[in-house]
Image (cartoon, rainbow, N blue to C red):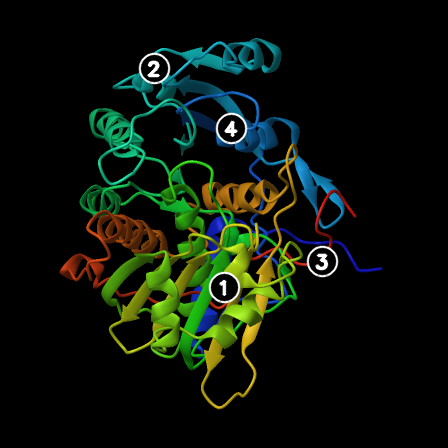
Amino acid sequence: MTGPVSSVNRRDFLAASALSMAAGGTSALSAAETVVVASPQKPLRVAAINSIYRLRSHAYHICGRIIHGFTKDGFHHQPALKLVRMYNDQSPKDDLGREYGKTFNVEVCDTVAATLGGMKSLDVDAVLLIIEHGDYPLNERGQVLYPRFELFQQIVDVFRTSGRSVPVFVDKHLSYDHQKAAQMVQTAREMKFGLMAGSSLPVTWRVPEIEPPLSTPFREGLVTFGFDRGSVEIYLFHALESLQCMLERRTGGETGVKSIQTLQGDAVWKAAAAGRFSLKLMDAALKNCVSNNVGSLRDNVADPLAVLIEYTDGTKGTILNLIEQTSEFGFAGTVEGQVDPVATGFYLPAPPAANFFNPLTWHIEQFFLAGTSPYPVERTLVTSTLCDFAMRSLHEGGKVMESPAMQIVYQSVPNSGYFRGSRSNGL
C-alpha cells in the first residue's frame, strides 16, 4: 500500500518540469507514471459546441463522461469539470441535447456566443468543439464538410470581444481543409490560448503495451485498418493519427512530409510488388488485430486502399484500408538495427460504451486543468493536412501530392500518455 498522494498546483508542476528539463532530464515524469494535475477547489466551467447530441455521437460520449465520470485504472474517476452549457448545430428527431440539459442542469443555447457567456462576457474556463456526426454534405473529394473551422472562428470572436481566452479542445480533425487547419493553429499561437485536438487512437490502450522511446531510428511504419461505412476519410484520419503518434518518435522528431499518394484496387498490390511498402510490416500489424480474417488476404480484400507517405528525412509511412481483412487498427514499424518489427494493436472497446473515450476524456481534463496540451497540436495539424492531401490524391486518380503545407516540424513528448493496464470498466 502506498502513502497519500500529494497534489501540486499548475505553477509548481510546470516549474518542476522545467527544472527537470534544465538539468538534462527527459521529463519530470517517467513513461510509467501518470501526470496528475491538482483539481481546483471548484470544478472548471466547460462549454460544449457540438454538431449533434444524440446516442453514440462523439458529443454524447465526451460530454457524458464529464457528467457521469468514467473508469480509470479500475476505479471510477469524476472529472474536475462541470458542463454548464452546450450548443448543438443540428437537432434531429433523435436529439438528446435538450433532454440531457434539463436532467443534468446544462443550459442548451441557440448560439455559440451565448454558450460561452456572451460576446463580451466569456464566463467559462474551457471549450469543447465536438463536430463529428450529423447531416453534412460531402464535397467532390468525398470529404465531410464539417464546420469545425467556422464554429472555431465564432469561439475566437468571443475571445476577442471579451478580452480573454481559454483552452479549446477540437475533436478529431482540425479541419477537412489543410489551410483552415493551419489557420486555427496560427490563431491559437497568436492569441496565446491552449489548443488540443485529435483522435482517441494515440491514447487508447495498446496490445502489446509498447512506447517507442524518443529518437527511435524508425525507417518505415505501417498501419492497417478496415472501414467501409461512408467516406473513407472518416477512419483514414484515425489511421493517420495511429501512424503519426509512432513515427513522430523517430530520430530527429517530425521533419515534415515530402509527398503523399493514395492508391486503390489493383494498384495497391502492384505497389506492394514494387516494394513501395512492406508486406512483412503488413503481416506484423495484422497479427495484433483480433479481427484478422482467415484465408487469403487477396481473396478477402476486393478493393484495398493504400496511402503512401514519404517523409522529408526518407522515412516511409503506409496506411492500408483492408476491408474484410480486419476491423481494427494495427501498427508495425521497421527499426534500424532490429530484425523484427515493432508492432502493436490499438484496443478500441466496442459500443455502446466505446470506452476508448475514457483515455481521451482524461487527457482533455488534464489539458483544461493545466492550460497546455499533453501532446503537440502540431501532430493533429500534420494528420489533418495529410488527410486532406490523401483525399485529393484519391480524387485525382492516385496523383502524387507535394506541398509546402506538409512541411510541418515538431518534437514529440517523452510520455505519449496512452492508457495502460485495465482496459475497460475495471476488467
> Disc 1 to disc 3, how far (Cα)?
27 Å
> Which callout, 1 or 3, points at the residue further toward the start of the chain?
1
Between disc 3 and disc 2, the foreground one is 3
> Disc 3 to disc 2, how far (Cα)?
41 Å
**Quadrant in the rendering for residue 56:** top right
- Identify the residue at image location x=62%, y=38%: 354
Left or right: 318 as drawn, with respect to 426: left
> Disc 4 to disc 3, how far (Cα)?
26 Å
> Which callout, 4 or 3, points at the residue further toward the start of the chain?
4
- Secondary structure at badge 4 equals loop
Between disc 1 and disc 4, the foreground one is 4
- Secondary structure at badge 1 equals helix
- Identify the residue at image location x=62%, y=64%: 288
In the drawing, what numbered circle is on residue 297? Answer: none
What amino acid type is highlighted by mark number 2? Answer: Ala
- Secondary structure at badge 3 equals loop
In the drawing, what numbered circle is on residue 421? Answer: 3
Left or right: 422 as drawn, with respect to 185: right
Q: Position of residue 232 (x, y in %)?
A: 39, 44
- Relative depth, front residue between 91 and 232: 232
- Identify the residue at image location x=23%, y=30%: 153
Q: Quadrant of the N terminus?
A: bottom right
Name the residue beneath numbered marker 4.
Answer: 57
> Disc 4 to disc 2, how far (Cα)?
23 Å
Name the residue beneath numbered marker 1.
Answer: 16
- Relative depth, front residue between 371 and 273: 273
> Disc 1 to disc 4, how far (Cα)?
38 Å
In the drawing, what numbered circle is on residue 114? Answer: 2
What amino acid type is highlighted by mark number 4? Answer: Ser
Residue 316 against residue 376 in the figure, above or below: below
For label 4, count other residues whose C-alpha is less than 10 Å away and answer few (under 14), some (14-19) or many (20+): some
